[in-house]
Each structure stands twice: as structure tokens, then as C-alpha cells.
Image (cartoon, coloured by chain):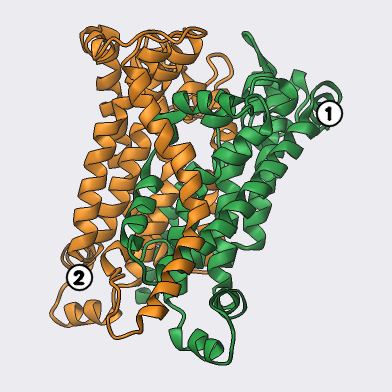
Chain colours: A orange, B green
Amino acid sequence: MASVAEAKWLPQKTRGSRRIKSESLTGYGLISPAVFLMLLLLAYPFVLAVYISLTDRVLGEPGKFIWFRNFIKLLQDSLFRQTVWNSFIYTASTVFLKMVLGIILAVLLNQEMRHRNLVRGALLLPWIVPTSLSVLTWLWMFDSLFSVVNYILLSLGLISKKIPWLGDPFWAMVSVITVNTWRGLPFFAISFLAGLMTIPKELYEAAETDGARGFRKFWHITLPLLQPVIAVVVLFSTIWTFADFQIVYLLTHGGPINATQIFATMAYDVALVAGRIGEGSAISLFLFPALLVVIILMLRYLRRD
Amino acid sequence: MKRKTLRTVKRILGLYLPLAAFLFFALFPFYWMLISSFKSNPELYNLRTNRLWIKNPTLEQFQELFKKTAILHWLWNSFFVAFLTSFISMTLGVMAGYALARLRFPGAQAFGLATFITYLVPTTLIFIPLASVVQSLGLSNSIWSLAVTYPTFLIPFCTWMLIAYFKSIPKEMEECAMIDGCSRIGAMIRIVLPMAIPGVVFSAMFSFTLSWNEFVYALTFISSTAHKTMSVAVPTELIRGDAYFWGELMAASLLGSVPVALLYSFFMDYFISGLTSGALKG
């Protein structure tokens, strides 16, 4: 990922101009199919999204140009404001949880143990299995009548009455945050583990001879050296969580009473269920500023290295 | 002796106990999926038995699933789309990745940057207009809509992964081949690609998974039962109104999860080393 910074694709003057010309031709030939596909199915739809968001298009009718009225209407809409708030809560809590738990898990996985690859593989499972299918399992685990989570907690005596996981605004948010953390934690842990593996052992040995122990070694060596990886992973996860769809769509469908409604689920409901495509596009586009911030921070970060 | 016991206790408290907690959190849903799909309905909804175990394992749920639903179709659709799109994306990704890693041409840097940025674009940002683009291409409600759109997020990923692998291969190898009369493309296919096999396997596997798991596009572009992929068919076709047939749902989820899990168990070493080396060369 740091290759943006490493890349020095400047034409070399020492070579013959003919060589450069043929190299350029090969280069353009090799990238053109990818470029064509990206322009048609990524860049063009993006421009189209901007255009549609400025119209009052509904399903079946092209609609007319209304400038920024969709955006103004949304900003005045209390449901949309709640969606913005929910999206921030959802993103901030899951990214924070994944980061803290991810660091702990990575430190654990970095130790010598038997069956290390098996353990690593098993812990990756939530991340590689289709999310829509594992979320169905969570839906069943949170079922109002048959919840196995409640069954376990009650059996252990940790709670005295059933928790309404998906039926109560607060617990519904806790549920979607739990499931998102469950799904995303492996990515954090394994990326941090990759970072940990690059830290030279000599640093710890040197610190030990100077009398540093357990937590101080972690605080003064591990954390500072892991910081670049943490930053990149957090940025990645921030944009993906902000734009997340399927966990909330399948678990709570934004409910109860919109307590877990986030950008993507609201955009889907407004555009494809209610058929107000212009307004739905406008909601989706609210993800763009977040994306822009992440891109800028990421490029700045990668350039610095 | 005492010292040894102390170390064992420390290791249990500091490593095995927390690790066991993480493993429980990660794996319990799969355990629950597994045992729910092998229970009969009376046992599944009986609150008085030990619910964490199966008394009478049965294949009922799977039999119902195969009898009543188009599950084989959905599995096939998922395979077809995932295989085709990873193949397309790997081919285009190898081409673009090689160009960016080795060739110098004006605009290369801009293209590299664009690839990186598109890698970050979430599908939910453009799924609404993309639906109308897919429609004007005449592809809506067909799995070809997925075959053309999935590469838009797979190609940036493959390109980006492969650049790192290609760069780690010494240039001299190809230069020798080219002096001996091999063309640039020939050198790429015969020299560089075989040396980048771990990267190629990793990217292909990951593309397959991303495509097998994709949800938003598949939900938006495809509406008829026969053309759905597993990830969308199971939650939309098996839940009818307020009726949840949990046994069948869990059995279907298991069938949709096993292929990727198998893929990973076969290539786990490639995958772990890919993730811990290529993925974050930051």
C-alpha cells in the first residue's frame, strides 16, 4: 500500500527515446482494459450519482433539475439527522473496539504457541465467510424468543431477565456494533500482526537489559512502531464501516424506530423501496466527504513514509 | 520447580485464557449455525432441553432445502460469478500491475493513484446510478450484471496486491530473457508471473471470496429467484414475511459458507503469508 510513495515512474532520459516510446505503448496497452472498465462502471456512475441527486427523479420518471433541494430537504429532516448521528456512533464505536481488541489479539497471536497457523486461520473465519449468511446466524442468536445469547447469559446467572437485543433502540445499536466488531476484528488483528512481525527482536532485548518489562515494552516499543499500520487500517475501516450496509440491513433493517438507521440503509430504503431515486442518491453522496477525508489523510500518511 | 509452575500460570493467564475468549467469540456463531442446521424443528424450538447440543442429529433441514428451493441454482450462480469475475480481474490486474511495477510511461503515476482511490470507494456510494447503467446495458436481472460490475472493485485490489509482488522480483531476470529475444509480454508471462505465484494465488483467492460474499450489487440488480447468488438468495428467498424457518436458514448459510472455508483451509499458508506480508507493506 505504500507503493504510492515508492513509485518513481519518471521517464529516464538515459534510455533511447525509441525504447521509451515502445514502453509507453505497451504500458497503455496493458492498462487500457482496466481503465475502460473503471471509467464506464465507476467514474461514469459517480458523475451520474451527482446529476441524479440534483433532480427529483422517482422510479419510472426521469424527473427535473432542482439544484440542491434534495440536500437542503435532507438536512432539515429529523430522520436524516438521526441517521447521520447513528452512522457516527456506529463507526466510532466499532472502529475503536476493533482497534483496541485487534492490538490485544495481535500481541497474543505473535507469541510462540502450538498450532499457531490453525489458531490464526480459525480466528479469520468471521472475516472470510459471507457476511450476509453469518449475520443471519446472529439474527437467530438474537431472536426475541429463542435467543441463545440470552440462554447462555441466563444460565451463567449474568443477567436476571432476557435482553431485547433487536427490539430496543439501545440494545439494537449494541447488537449491530457487536456484529460489526465480530466481522471486522480479524482484519485488524492480522494486519497488526503483520506489523508486529516486522519489529526487530533486538529492540526488546535491548529494552530488557535496560530493565524495561511487560507493559512498558509494549508502550514504548510496540505501540510507536505499530502506529503507521494502525493508522492505515483505521482509515480503511473507517470508510468501509461508514458506508456499511448489510449488517444493519439484515439485523435490524434500521429499526426499531430508526434507532440503527445509517447512510446506506436509508439510501436503499428511500431510493429503491420508496422509489425516490433523486433523494436516495443525495443520501449516498453524503458518504463522499467522508471518503474524501480518508483519501486525503491516507495519501498524506503514505507519502510521509 | 516452583519457577516453572509460576511460568505456566503466567502463560495460562496471559495467553491461553484471553486467546480462548477470542476464539469463543469468533467461533460460537459458526457452532450455532452448525448445530442448528442438524436439528429437527421440534428440537430446535424446544426451550427445555440443553440447547447447546444435538440430541437427534438429522438431515431434515437439508432435505427440505433441496426439495423446496432453488439452492443448487444459487450455489451455481455464486460459483459462476465468483470464478468468472476473479479470472477477469486477475487477468486485467496482472496486466495493469505489471505495467505499474515495471514500465515507465506518462500517466502511470496518475493511474496508480486512481487505482488506489477506487480501491477505497464503497459500493454503497454508487449503487443507485449503477443500477441504471446496468439497465441501459441491458443486463439488469441477469448474473452478467454482476460479472461486469464486480471487477470494478476487484481489479484495483488485484492490481495493488500484484504491484508489490512484481516489484519484489529482480528486474535482471526479465532483462536477460529480453536480451535473448523474448518480448516484454513474453517475459511477463514466462518469467515474472511464475515467480509471483504466491501473490497470484493470494489475490485470486481473495477476489473469489470478495465476489462470493458481495451483497449490495447483487441485492440491487437482481430480482428473480433463479438468478440470485447465495449471499442474497438465502436472506431474501428463505425469509417470507414474518416467517423464519431457522433450521433451513442455518442449513443454507452453512452450505454458502463451506466453499470459502474449504478454499481457505487448502490455501491457508498462502493466505496467512499473503496477509502478513503483501497486504500491508506500509
Q: Quadrant of residue B71?
A: top right
Q: Is residue A248 left or right of residue A79?
A: right
Extreme residue toward the left, this view: A210
User: Measuring 40% from the left and 79% from the top, which residue is drawn there?
Assistant: A18
> Disc 1 or disc 2, which is closer to the eye?
1
- Estimate the x, y position of residue A253 in percent, counting from the top left: 47, 17
Chain under numbered label 2: A
Residue B11 to residue B239: above or below: below
Q: Residues within 10 Å of mark 2 (few under 14, many from 20)?
A: few
Residue A20 to residue B160: above or below: below
- Residue holding disc 2: A213
Can residue A46 be seen here? yes
Type of the residue with mark 1: Phe
- Estimate the x, y position of residue B12 in percent, counting from the top left: 42, 60
- Residue holding disc 1: B66
Q: Label 1 to label 2, Cα distance in Å?
A: 59 Å
Under tag 1, what secondary structure? helix
Can residue A260 be seen here? no
Q: Which quadrant is the N terminus of chain A positioned in? A: bottom left
Q: Which quadrant is the C terminus of chain A positioned in? A: bottom left
Nearest the eye: A96 or B276: B276
- Estimate the x, y position of residue A178 in percent, counting from the top left: 40, 33
